[in-house]
Amino acid sequence: MNARAALRTATAENHEIVDAAFACFDLADPDGYRRFLTAQAGGFLAVEAALDEAGAEAALPDWPTRRRAGLLLADLADLSVTPPEPFAPLPHFSGKASMLGAIYVIEGSRLGGALLKRSVPETFPRRFLDARQDAGSWRRLLKSLDENLLRPDDLDAAILSAKKVFARFAKAARA
């Protein structure tokens, strides 16, 4: 089994929990959409900031082009929503494997966002959900996982990191 398949299998339950937690938001309703973006911010902003602090471009050179925090903050501002304070503990990523596990989750959320935006009226701000990847971006990430998570310890670190990020999103959705 390659690293990406192992990561997907090991975090499948965590992914299902997050999907279920976010399924309760009515994205066609202005208040539901505000709550959805606030919950996204509760998980996303601290993770992206921690990846920046850890030097994620060392793990994935095109990391700066993948950043979406500014888009999320702009959508929240358009809706007159103050971003939530990050809850403790703040995420910390050390090492390439740990960063790749976290990036796997938040880049995967971009794919989910492409599906979710179908439920969001076009009159709502949708920069965050509309954020597109560069052509081949997802494939490059998967290739990087397979090339960098060869050792069992590295794969374990990526899985642990991904599970922590999923847990952070689940907690934010319930908050």
Image (spheres, rainbow, N blue to C red):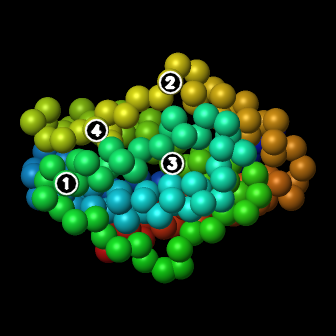
Residue depicted at 32% across the width and 39% down the height? 129
Disc 4 marks a residue whose amino acid type is Arg
Whichever of labels 1 and 3 marks the residue nearer the N terminus, that label is 1
The quarter of the picture where the C terminus appears is: bottom left
For label 1, the residue is 77
The residue closer to the viewer here, 89 or 151, is: 89
The residue closer to the viewer here, 115 or 20, is: 115
Disc 2 marks a residue whose amino acid type is Asp
User: Secondary structure beneath disc 4?
Assistant: helix
Residue depicted at 9% across the width and 36% down the height? 123
User: How much space separates mark 1 and mark 3, taking CA atoms?
Assistant: 21 Å
Whichever of labels 3 and 4 marks the residue nearer the N terminus, that label is 3
The quarter of the picture where the N terminus appears is: top right
User: How much space separates mark 3 and mark 4, taking CA atoms?
Assistant: 16 Å
Residue 121's disc number: none
For label 4, the residue is 127
Residue depicted at 78% across the width and 36% down the height? 146
User: Secondary structure beneath disc 3?
Assistant: helix
Q: Is residue 32 visible?
A: no
For label 2, the residue is 134
Q: Is residue 11 left or right of residue 22?
A: right
In percent of width and height, residue 77 lies at 19, 54
Q: Residues within 10 Å of mark 1 (few under 14, many from 20)?
A: few
Callout 3 touching callout 2 (CB < 8 Å): no
